Image (cartoon, grey):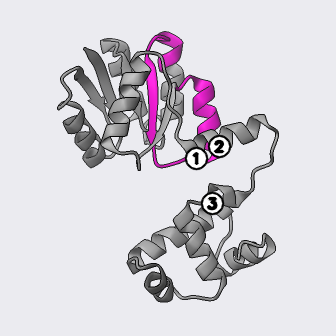
Amino acid sequence: MIRIIVIDDHDVVRKGVIAYLETEDDFQVIGEACSGNEGVEIVLEKKPDVVLMDLIMENGNGIEATKQIKTVFPDCKVIVLTSYYDDKQIFPVLEAGAFSYLLKTASAEEIVSAIKKAYHGENVIEPKVAHRVMNRFQGKQLTLHDQLTERELEVLICLANGATNQEIADQLFIGIKTVKTHVSNILRKLDVHDRTQAAVYAHRHRLL
């Protein structure tokens, strides 16, 4: 029986993951937490085999929680399950001792598989994360737009061509709220303040 603790500050995500894990005959969810600090306490008390760890949380982030857990309980396998895959998250949490790294776009089956593999000593790294890790070790300088998802890159190109949010939504067959979310993510990842600066970035780096 694989004993698991899930740490995530989003109740819907945490409860959904737990509900699916509990359908597996060889899984036992022995605890849950909504913050890094609370998670550390529960992990050190119950000593699970595997921890699913979110990264961005209040009251103790996943990086610091992972570091504390691995310092006191090195046998625990920490699997990162997050929406983020930028260098500021990837390398610190891997250095802290995370065993595997998954994105929340992973399917339930992929999460189950990663837990089973971790239990048997085999790690799983999301391909986008593995790419960044390999580039780091190969000494390649990553650009800011390497952080963009394929959809975000499509939105950036439309934006740089002068399209409005509604026009982008029509061209890509997505909702306007989704477009606004993508634009917000693009501005953050490119470290620019507005659409004009994002468009200039796209032209300067010949992304069109």
- Label 2–label 1 contact, CB within 8 A: yes
On screen, residue 81 versus residue 190, left or right, reads left
Q: Which amino acid lies under the numbered mark 1 shown in the image of this protein?
A: Lys
Residue 189 position within the rendered picture, expressed as x and y whole percent measured from the top left: 63, 60
Judge whether residue 147 is colored magenta: no
In this rendered view, identify the residue nearer to me: 69 or 155: 155
The image quadrant that residue 5 belongs to is top left
In the rendered structure, which disc, 3 or 1, sits on the residue that comes first in sequence?
1
Q: Which numbered circle lies on residue 189?
A: 3
Q: Residue at x 45, y 20 (%)?
A: 77
Q: Residue at x 47, y 19 (%)?
A: 69
Quadrant that contains the N terminus: top left
Q: Which amino acid lies under the numbered mark 2 shown in the image of this protein?
A: His
Q: Which numbered circle lies on residue 128?
A: 1
Please say whether residue 177 is visible from this viewpoint. Answer: yes
- Bin the neighbour count of mark 2 within 10 Å (Cα to Cα): few under 14, some 14-19, many 20 and up: few
Q: Secondary structure at mark 1?
A: helix
- Bin the neighbour count of mark 1 within 10 Å (Cα to Cα): few under 14, some 14-19, many 20 and up: some
Please say whether residue 61 is visible from this viewpoint. Answer: no
Numbered circles on residues, count: 3
Q: Is residue 177 above or below residue 43?
A: below
Residue 38 position within the rendered picture, expressed as x and y whole percent measured from the top left: 36, 28
Residue of label 2: 131
Judge whether residue 77 is colored magenta: yes
